[in-house]
Image (spheres, coloured by chain):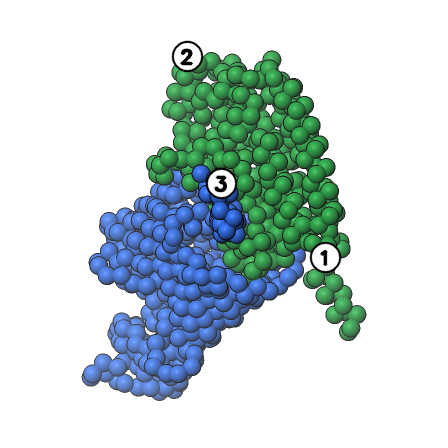
Chain colours: A blue, B green
Amino acid sequence: MFKRICSNAAIAVLLCHSIQAAAADSGNADNAFNPAFSLILSGSYGNLQRDPAIPATGFAMNPNPGHEQGFNLGESEMGISANIDPQFRGAATLALDPAGGISVENAFVQTTSLGDGLNLKFGRFFSGLGYLNEQHAHAWDFTDQPLVYAVLWENQLAEDGLQLKWLAPTDMFFEIGGEVGKGRGFPGTERAKNGSGAGVLFAHVGDDIGIEQSWRAGASLHRTRRVAAESVDVPDLNGNAVTNLFSGDSQTVGLDLVWKYAPDGNVRNSYVKLQAEYFRRKESGELTYDTALAGANVTDSYSVTQSGFYVQGVYQFMPRWRSALRYDRLDPGIAQIGALNAGNVIADYAYNPTRTTWMLDYSPSEFSRLRLQLAHDNSRQGLADNQVFVQYIMSLGAHGAHQY
Amino acid sequence: MKNLLFAISLLLFSSTSNASLNVFACEPEWAALVQQLAGDKTNIYTATAALQDPHHIEARPSLIAKARRADLVVCTGAELEMAWLPVVLRESGNSKVQPGGSGYFEAASVVHMLEVPTRLDRGDGDVHAQGNPHIQTDPRNFLPVADALGKRLAQLDPANAADYRQRLAAFTRRWNEAIAGWEKQAAPLKGVAVVVQHQGFPYLSAWLGLKEVATLEPKPGMEPSAAHLSQVLNTLQQHPAKMVLRAAYQDDRPSEWVSQRAHIAAVELPYTVGGSAEAKDLYGLFDDTIARLLKGMQ
């Protein structure tokens, strides 16, 4: 039929030729849905012995891991992506809050035709720092992020801004990138000002070792500024819980390493994945102690270096079944406190929060996963917590390709 | 200092030969075909190996680095690589090899596809909208692919166009002769009933006239369950089969389990170049496939 139409009119030859050429290389299946649409359904049951609102010792001025007790619907995630035109591709991920409301997790445009190894992305995106930061929650190997991500990046740093990456034309994978953004998420604070509020630099190298092993290593640097950031229920030297205000500069360095091994390179049957990340943040500025109406309201200099790391291993011991172990450790650092607040603000907590987590998951297909996770949490001094989580993650719609 | 810089740049930007095209082949069979059609005119990088499940490849840093320098990406298509190739191409920052461009070639686009689903529902397992992507098990499919690929090579590297045309003609002639030989050898296989582990052999079966009576995977891409395997044994009592087929990359346990209980041969086929010691190139692939099938008949 198609052939006949094409051969009938000589004038149609050119047209048919171009249609055939277009049909020949239609590209990936995502184009069958234009745009590609996907929905992640996830939910969990959490059993905790302690109130999840209690922060890790020494991290009362940082975000909390945000665990929830009992049955709860996690964030359902809706993803839409497509090529916009020959130059741009757009992608958005909308998180549907169980309490109602929609938040924009990602909404970015990226270039597809700059060439020379360049990739430019703009809009709201997960920052390219570290290894885990760019991965969406449904791709995590545990129900929660490592402690160091929870307290230093509020689980994940999403930036409003732009990112430029360059991949070197080398046999070995070598990529450098930089981002400028608003600095809207922790550790920055959203401010009404011109210019950029945060900057990130990162570099990644990676390669294969034979056919069975592969690895990627990275280093990152993040800088931003916190302005009038309020923290409530911060313990002080007098045994009270007060509200503090901090303004100052924040600089974080990070190192990440991931190594994977699969017999014959066949990840379907079994594989091992080992990964570790370390972050170290220096904040320095001014702290106002006890800002309550009748509070002390004392302002003086404050600087502290917080750090933390995790190491984890995932083992797929047979098709569809994986088990993993993770160890987390944080160091709240010893703060340098101006003389005026020396008698108010705790400088040295003398405690390192730790946590050990084990999980087992079963994936009946590529699109569904059921998980059991047990954690022994020593992140709060004197408040050891044994945590149990059961989770499901299901994805429907377009088959998204996963990052390394 | 100058010497050091030179040494570093050599190390970083070394290209192994003076071949004019860098080809990134998604699967070994397309690397082997490019080898036939281009010889030493190309540097060929093969992204996956015969013992890897082609549906489950990760977008490893090494793949992204190789795609960065590619002039031509040759893949099966039909969604076989959808779990990793889109990320590799996007991250490569290489505008030459993006889908739709002249540096991107899908073999499935020029082959008559089998098992194109009439309904798209993930309840039916890992089905591919454009049809079954395992086209490399029928040697006849290599003819249209070689034709289109040879022309593409000539288009990308016009300086060597005459050479590509010559090689294409030589390959087509030799391949047609080889197909005639294989079909003669494989005549006893016509109408033979077989069980397959994964729905990966429709093109082979269609070519040789094998009759697939059961599949060990309950649905495409799902692991064979104990309950489903016993059901297969029941089916085999009513419709006996001669052998159970699996690809070299697949777990051997399900087919060995059925083989022992149904007393039929379990046959591991190379599936692609490199899948067995004998499958060194495209000719070896089909020589060995036919030999193993005939052995399974005994």
Q: Tell me the tag on residue B238.
A: 2
Query: Dot 2: few (<14), some (14–19), or many (≥20) neighbours within 10 Å?
Result: few
Q: Secondary structure at mark 1?
A: loop
Quickly name the residue at label 3. Answer: A3
Three-letter code for the amino acid on which mark 2 is drawn = Gln
Q: How many marks?
A: 3
Point out the frontmost of discs 3 and 2. 3
Q: Earlier in the sequence, mark 2 or mark 1?
A: 1
Quickly name the residue at label 1. Answer: B15
Q: Label 3: chain? A: A
Q: Residue at x 48, y 69 (%)?
A: A163
Q: Residue at x 37, y 42 (%)?
A: A368
| Quadrant holding the C terminus of chain B | top right
Q: Secondary structure at mark 2?
A: helix
- Contact flag, marks 3 and 2 (Cβ < 8 Å): no
Q: Is residue B218 visible?
A: yes
Q: Is residue A215 visible?
A: no
- Residue A353 position within the rendered picture, expressed as x and y whole percent measured from the top left: 40, 61
Query: Dot 1: few (<14), some (14–19), or many (≥20) neighbours within 10 Å?
Result: few
For marks 3 and 2, give the CA distance: 45 Å
Q: Label 2: chain? A: B
> Viewed as shown, does residue A108 lie left or right of B196?
left
For marks 2 and 1, give the CA distance: 59 Å
- Residue A367 position within the rendered picture, expressed as x and y whole percent measured from the top left: 38, 43
Occupied quadrant, residue B290: top right
Query: Vertically, is A207 above or below B38?
Result: below
Q: Residue at x 50, y 51 (%)?
A: A11
Query: Dot 3: few (<14), some (14–19), or many (≥20) neighbours within 10 Å?
Result: few
Q: Label 1: chain? A: B
